[in-house]
Structure formats: C-alpha cells, structure tokens
Image: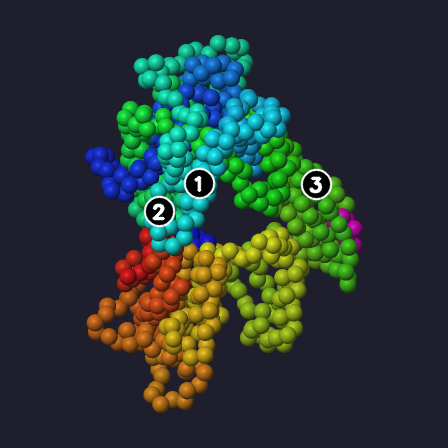
Amino acid sequence: MSVCAPLCTHHPHPPHSPPPTPHRRFLVKGADLSASVAVFLIALPLSLGIALATGAPLQAGLVAAAVGGLVAGRLGGSPLQVSGPAAGLTVVTADLIHRYGWQATCGITVLAGLAQLSLGCLRVARGALAVSPAVVHGMLAGIGVTIAVAQLHIVLGGSPDSSVLANLRALPAQLADLHPAAVSMSALTLTLLLAWPRIPGRAGRLLRGVPAALVAVAGATATAALTGLALPRVDLPSWSGHALPQPPDGPVLGIATAVLTITLVGSVESLLSAVAVDKLIAARGGPHVPRSDLDRELRGQGAANIVSGALGGLPVTGVAVRSAANVQSGAVSRNSTMLHGVFVVVAALLMVPLLEQIPLASLAALVMAVGIQMVSLHHIRTVTRHREVLVYAATTLGVVFLGVLEGVALGVAVAVALALHRLTRTRITHEEKEGVHHVHVRGQLTFLAVPRLSRALHLVPQGAHAVVELDGSFMDHAAYESLQDWQSAHTARGGSAELAGRRGGVTTADPAPSAVCRCRPWTPWRNHQSCFAGTPSAPAAPAARELARGISSFQRNTAPLVRAELARLAREGQRPAQLFLTCADSRLVTSMITSSGPGDLFVVRNVGNLVPPPGEEHGDDSVAAAIEYAVEVLGVRSITVCGHSGCGAMQALLTAEPGEPQTPLKRWLRHGLPSLARMASDRRAWPRLAGRAPADAVEQLCLTNVVQQLEHLRAHDSVARALAAGALELHGMYFHVGEAQAYLLGRTGKVFEDVKDDGSAVKELRSPV
C-alpha cells in the first residue's frame, strides 16, 4: 500500500473519463518507440500461435495484430492498452470455424464489431464491470484449460480435436505415438520460456529486456533449421489469395448466439484490461496519461473488429499481457500502440521467409504455456478468500465442457444464487450474560429476517440493558426501521440499548463514565478522549483496568470484523508494500493518516524518526535491522520517512547545552545532529513548505530532519542496491498534527507540498535528490 494512495482520494475528472486534451501535432517520443518495439516482439509470435490454436489461416493473426494496433490504438479510449488477437477468444473462434468455416467466421467478427460499436454509443460500457470477478476469472481459467489440452496434441506431434472431451480421450493414443522432433522443439521452447526471465546477475537484467516469448520461438526455430529436423512449420499463403469474409450461412439463432458470444467475451475482456492498465499506470507514476474512457474503448474495439473481420483477420480484443508490457516499457501515449501495429504490417510483408521457418510445435508450446498461465493461483486464492470458489469452479467447468457463453451463463446463475442464499441466511441468537441481554445478528439483515429479529428482541425484558451486535455488511430499510422502533420503545420503558458491530456504537442509555473509551476504528476521530487520561472532572482510572477495558472493547466490537482478515494474514504471512519510518509521538496514528489496515505497512517508530547512518549505531542495530529485513526479506517497494509538527526530539536538539550528561536519550539524539548542522549550513537551501513559511525553528528542523534522514537511508547497502535496481522508492512526509494536514516531499527534495482535501497532491513521488 502506498502512503499517497489513501490521501489522494479525489480526481479532477470522473473515473474512467478522460480530461479534455488540446490538439497536438503527431510526435513520437523515444519512450513510445522503445515500448512499441518491445510490444511488437511479444505480439508477433503470440499472434501466429493464437491463429494456429484457432485453426484459422496464420496470417489472420498478423492482420488482427496490425488492426488492433492501428485502429483500436487510434480510436480506443485507453491510450496505453494494446489490442490484438487474444487467447480469451481462441476457443470461441475455433468453434465458429469448425461450425461455419473461416470466411463466415470473419463475417461474424464484423457483426460483433457492429454490436460493440452500438453498445459503445449507448454508453453501457461500465455495466460490464458489474460482472463478478469470479465469473471472469473462471471464464479465463476454463478457456486456458481448453487451450492447453488442445495444444498439447500439437506439442506431441499430432492434431487436436474440436472439443475438450475428445482431446482428453485421444490423449493416451497420442502419448503412445510421440513425434520426437516435435516434442524436442516444444521442450526447448518451454525451457527457454521458463528459464529466460530467471537468468541471474547483471547479465540477466540486460537479457531480460528481450521478451521470453521471442527468445523461445527464435531459439527453437534456429535449432530446427541448424539440425535439419523434418517437422511441420508455419505456412503463410500468398496475400493475393488471402480469404475475405462472406455472410454466415446457418440458423439465425446460431448466428446471433455466435455474434453475442464474441461481443460479450471480447467486450468484458477489453474493459477489464483497460481498468487494469489504469492501475498499472497509476502505480508506475511518471508522465500524466489520461484515464480510460470505457465507452470510447468499446467503440474502438468495435471499429477494430469490423476492420479485422473485413480484412480476413481474427477477432480483436484488449490484451492484458501486451498492455502490461507497454506500460512497463515506459510508453507515454497511444503512439506506442500504433507503432507496434506498423511493425506488424512490415513484418507480415517483408519477413515471410523467416516466419515460415518457425516450427508449429514451438508456437503450440508457447500458446499452451499461455493457456496454463490463465489458470491463475492468485485468482483462485482471491475467490477462495471471498468465498466465491463455487462460482469460479462452476464457470470454469461450464466453459470447458459446455462452451464459453454457456459457462459464463452458468457462472452468473451460480453467483446470483449464492448472493440470494447469503442474503437470506441470517442467524439471530439471544443470550443473557451477567444481567446483560445480547442479541447477535450474523449475516445480512433484510426484511426477510425481520420476523426472527422481532422475536429475539421481544425476549429482552422491560427495563433490562441490551446489546444488539450486528455482524454483517448490509441492513435494508425495513430492518433498520424495525430495530429503531424497538430501541425507542425499549428505552421509553426504562431500558437501555446499545448497537454494536458494523453499524457503529449507538447507545441510548445514560452516558457512561468519561473514562470509558468510546473510540471505534470505523468512526470519525471526533472529540476523542484518551481511555487512560481521564477528564478534569474525573480522574484517570488505574491503567491496568483501563487497558483491560480497552482490550475487552476490541474483543467485543472490533475482533469480529477483522478476524477473517487477520486469519488470512496469519496463513499467508505479511507482505507489506511499504516501510513507514516515523516518530514515536503518541499523537501520530499511522493507520489513521494513511488509511491503512493490517498487513499494509511495516512500521518502525523511534524518538525523532531517526535513521542512524551505517556504522554509527554503536550497539543499537534495531533501525538498520528493520530496514534490511523490510528491503531484503519483505521486498517493500517504498520507504517513507515521516516527521511531524511539535516534535519533542527536535525541540531537545535545538535547546541542548554543551556538556550536558550523556543519558540514553542524549546518546540517541546524536543521530539528529547532522540535521541540525544541515539547517545551520549556508551552503544548503532549507527544505520548505509549499504555500507558507515554517512556523518556527522547530518546524524548520523537523522538515530538514526528514531530508537528512533520507540521505542516511540511502547509505545503507540494502537500500542502495534496491535503488540501483529500480525496485525501491524513497518518500519524505511531514504531518502537521494541529492542522491534520499531510505534506509530501516533491521530486526536488526541497519543497513539501500539501495534500489537500480536494485531491490535489504531488503527482510524481520519486527518490528526492
């Protein structure tokens, strides 16, 4: 979790809607050129492999890749999304070719493009995002299984059937009749594909710049050519005989179903990929790239499918793998996507003799690996954590054994049934403990549960104290009114009632003593009174009793809400994205100012948020050990040093007198002396706040100390190595306690810019210079 993410919650324009941009002349930047080359090198072998998997002419994959780059890249609403033939439509396209033939499939692609264009004009693109992620992941997993099973036959030297069951039945016979040449080239392709990204050392970092897919196919092609192996190779027919579309001939209902399937699958995959690209761009930082306009993206995909089908190409959709490569390669505009399409056109026209040397077994192995990767263990863990594994499994099996559209429909039906089951499955219990009547509601509280709720509430005697614990995420209007009516009637008869749980603490009894902690993690921090401090009219209670009372409040109110999340973290271990190094000041609540939760931040707190330089710890390696553990073991992606206003450590540094006795505190604060010297130096400009001067010398030292501690941080070996590898960012932060205002250190390392409540903030957070 990034510190800046929760602080920047507003956007100057609606989500997924681009801001107006002025007209600019066409200009290709170096970043776009290098990114386009990287995407082209990935797209070329995958396009041929996907065409092979569908049974279409191999040049149809090149046509779709070129059209996806040029048409969807120019007209689409996601500037950095790369479109082309996708594995997600492989099963659908293969089935259509088997039923209607290739030219009729091209005609169906044109009709699907028209349907996408119409949906984009109706501005319904965001409706696709309402599909349960479990259904989408299950659909991709089912398609991946189907692809992998089919391509396995080509890997072994045979030819696949049209259905998964037929391929599975034929597999024993295929294993008994292996073709050594095909198997050897497939094995070489898979070995290179898996080993290339794992080459260690500096050489590995340089070599990984070449896509593994290209290396795998090129290596198998070169080996087959040098050894003279006799095995089937790519066959690109002459472009003069390239097949163009024709109107599909068949039952109207079947044609309509085919068009609907391509439209829905292609649209959902493209829109979800566009949303994922937005997240990648936001995580990358750097130059501003407009957010995706999903309706425009849908229109762009429709136009691309119309052109691709008309030119005899495969269906086009947004492709997550190529899009991610485009973003990670540094692309800054849609020019990179369009240039990759130009390179595909050049390759299709000028590199035919070279492409025809590629063994089909090598392409099949590449596509089989893609299919296996579509069954994501991360997705399985996610749906399991959210209790949607049944939806995922139903969709996957439905796609494998029934078809894509049928499998998706089955998954949606199971998802709806599961939601209704959860909505109606509400457990309500009543028990009495030490004179207090507890009514526990577990599950969603809807009108269907109102009769049972009323029966449980009427078991509470008049005048008694009752606690209604709501352990659910939803309460409809009927249940709310029933609960409020009972509460009003119960208190009117001399009783007291407290609502606890997700609905917050609402107490209608007389106010409790001021020493009772009323804080709730999910309620605003308004009029907060420390549980241990007491008030002017009520002295503080014994600390042990107040600590026990606070723990009891946690067990009753908070633990039921976080137990599942903490259980997951206990199973999976901690994987924080950020090391947050800040002061031990009790007013600095890291979880509050960063909106973070369990497992998000690895926090180190000490007096003065100091980072001892390497070699100066003098027996206290605690901070250095935490830094090394966070960087080397946990693999955090950023480190934030956070100072704050009114820091007692900085005040002590300013007021220290020479010759004072060296107490443990004085010895620790010596690590802040470089900050004091930095502020006193005439050769260095003072860090400052944007918009106002520091209030006093203490605040100036607090700001200077953040910059100085960042320099200490860079001197640590683990940090230096991670910075050199581009795997780590350093951030500076200052929090004004009295104003509840956060400031982030800009790129220059000189100005702390405030994060305002209107969402404006520092856009580029890099390691300060």
Q: Residue at the spot x=41%, y=38% of the render?
A: 216
First in sequence: mark 1 vs mark 3: 1
Disc on res. 207: 2
At label 1, which amino acid type do we have?
Answer: Leu
Where does the C terminus fall, quadrant-wise?
Answer: bottom left
Residue at the disc numbered 3: 425
SS at badge 2: helix
At label 2, which amino acid type do we have?
Answer: Leu
- For marks 2 and 1, give the CA distance: 13 Å
Disc on res. 753: none
Disc on res. 193: 1
Q: Position of residue 47 (x, y in %)?
A: 40, 29
Q: Is residue 456 left or right of residue 335?
A: right
- Name the residue at the front extreme: 227
Q: Is residue 306 left or right of residue 569?
A: left
First in sequence: mark 2 vs mark 3: 2
Q: Is residue 717 visible?
A: yes
First in sequence: mark 2 vs mark 1: 1
Mark 3 surroundings: few (<14), some (14-19) or many (≥20) residues within 10 A = some
Q: Position of residue 766 (x, y in %)?
A: 33, 56
Q: Residue at the spot x=57%, y=23% of the render?
A: 163
Span shown in magenta = 456-461
